[in-house]
Image (cartoon, rainbow, N blue to C red):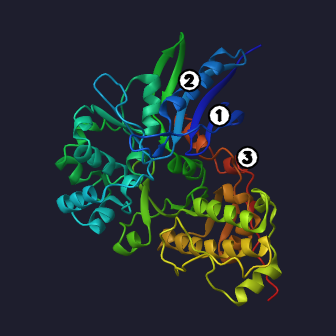
Amino acid sequence: MSKKKVTIVFDIGKTNKKFFLFDKNYKEVVREYTELPLTTDEDGYPTEDLAALQNWIKDNFNAILDDENFEVKAINFSTYGASFVHLDQKGNVLTPLYNYTKPMDREILDLFYEKHGSKLKIARETASPQAGMLNSGLQLFWLKYKHPEVFKKIRYSLHLPQYLSYLFTGICVSEFTSIGCHTNLWDYDKADYHDWVYEEEIDALLPPIVPTSASINTSYRNKKIKIGVGIHDSSSALLPYILSKKEPFLLLSTGTWSISLNPFSDESLTDEDIENNCLNYMRIDGKRVKASRFFMGNEYKIQVEKLCAHYGKEYGFHREVQFDQDLYLRLMKHKAVYFRFEGIILKRKMISATDLNSFATFEEAYHQLMIELMDLQIHTIKNAIGNSDIKTIYIDGGFTDNDVFMKLMSHHFQDYHVMSTHSPLGSALGASMVISNKKIDDTFLQQHYQMKVLQPLILNV
């Protein structure tokens, strides 16, 4: 029996760690999910357990190598961004993988802006809304001034996707999609690291930049395997669309973050864009992607847990709620803000506490929550589109299963061709494609993404 030739992709989200096997036509052969327990850093702040992650990757990799059914031809990695692994001269890991939600010391931030320019200036030039640890370049500045004894020992700082690649190759590299994701490191207009990186001599700790499509051929247990250099997950999720569609489009990638991605804008960000939480990601060729994001999935989870507690429902009940037109129209008649959002910093009316007493049922309160989240979603999509001539919106990720969200999208964007693309492969597929030379055409998405055109709602007002 001949073995099936496969590419392995490790797709590392903050919550779910996923492991995929793809055949040569990018068909999914195997998929495994796990959640790994967190550990804490030296301040007791929760963070990814790097050792547990390595062990999980190694165990899955070895199991596939031992499996008589498969011949592994390539491996690649897609992971969340804003996370650095710092190595010493011998390749030992020096620090925890600091969580990008960890608060950063005020005095270090003040020192940074005092030395290198105002918040707005840095944000505009690096296309990174200023957000402390989420601007992973600032983690290096923070280490330099907060933990100088550790900083002195750093030989290389690797973005998380490149660290996972390094585990297999022993070679330290950087690549565009990780450098370009709100790190504060890259000056988009200059197409080089920002001046502050050179002034602080941090460039010396960043390995050489290679193309995202680069791979390193290694021999592992006498088998020749191509190892990719890894890719940032948001750029990876975008890749199958860019490779197969020529007409301008916006991709709305939903999950913990709701990110509107416009790969057809080459305008520099304005001050107003920055104030609206716009940023740039990078395509694999170093071109900019205009993006606008908000912490929608995170907020949704916080609020849904409260709804379940308030109305005595099991967590998970919300997944069954279908769009109710009468309920929606009734709520829109007396439109107001009822929810106090906890994790979203976009401008909206602030109220002192969430008011659930105005809603008789879970379903009613849930519709109201979705209306309030949708207001922010409309705002972020329009910011990302800017002046681009976009007529098509693709929606992927977790919220494609949310009936209320999808109906509201079709209602508010009836002038667009709105399509839901259901692919549990998300960023894994892009990671598999980027290290292959296989050409694809515009039927590709149809084959892999169960695409559905959303019909605009005809509301009986």
Which quadrant is the N terminus positioned in? top right
Q: Quadrant of residue 436?
A: top right
Identify the residue position indicated by label 2 in the image.
58
* Residue, far top: 222
In the rendered image, residue 154, in percent from the top left (x then y), is placed at 27, 33
- Which is more N-terminal, label 2 or label 3? 2
In the rendered image, residue 82, in percent from the top left (x then y), is placed at 42, 48
Note whether 431 is above or below 155 in the view shown: below
**Three-letter amino acid code at the position of disc 1:** Phe
Spatial distance from mark 3 to mark 1, Cα to Cα? 18 Å
In the rendered image, residue 34, in percent from the top left (x then y), is placed at 65, 37
Q: SS class of the residue under badge 2?
A: helix
Note whether 216 is above or below 144 in the view shown: above
Mark 3 is surrounded, within 10 Å at the Cα level, by few (under 14), some (14 to 19) or many (20 or more) other residues, namely few
Q: SS class of the residue under badge 1?
A: strand
**Three-letter amino acid code at the position of disc 3:** Gln
Horizontal placement of 418 versus 113: left or right? Answer: right
Mark 2 is surrounded, within 10 Å at the Cα level, by few (under 14), some (14 to 19) or many (20 or more) other residues, namely few
In the rendered image, residue 267, in percent from the top left (x then y), is placed at 38, 67
Select label 3 or label 2 by which is in front. Answer: 2
Horizontal placement of 111 versus 293: left or right? Answer: left
- Please give the name of the residue rendered at 81% of the width and 67% of the height, measured from the top-left corner: 322
- Which is more N-terminal, label 1 or label 3? 1
Q: SS class of the residue under badge 3?
A: helix
Identify the residue position indicated by label 1 in the image.
20
Please tell me which residue lies in front, 253 or 324.
324
**Three-letter amino acid code at the position of disc 2:** Lys
Q: Quadrant of residue 187?
A: bottom left
Residue 389 in sight from this viewpoint? no
Identify the residue position indicated by label 3 in the image.
447
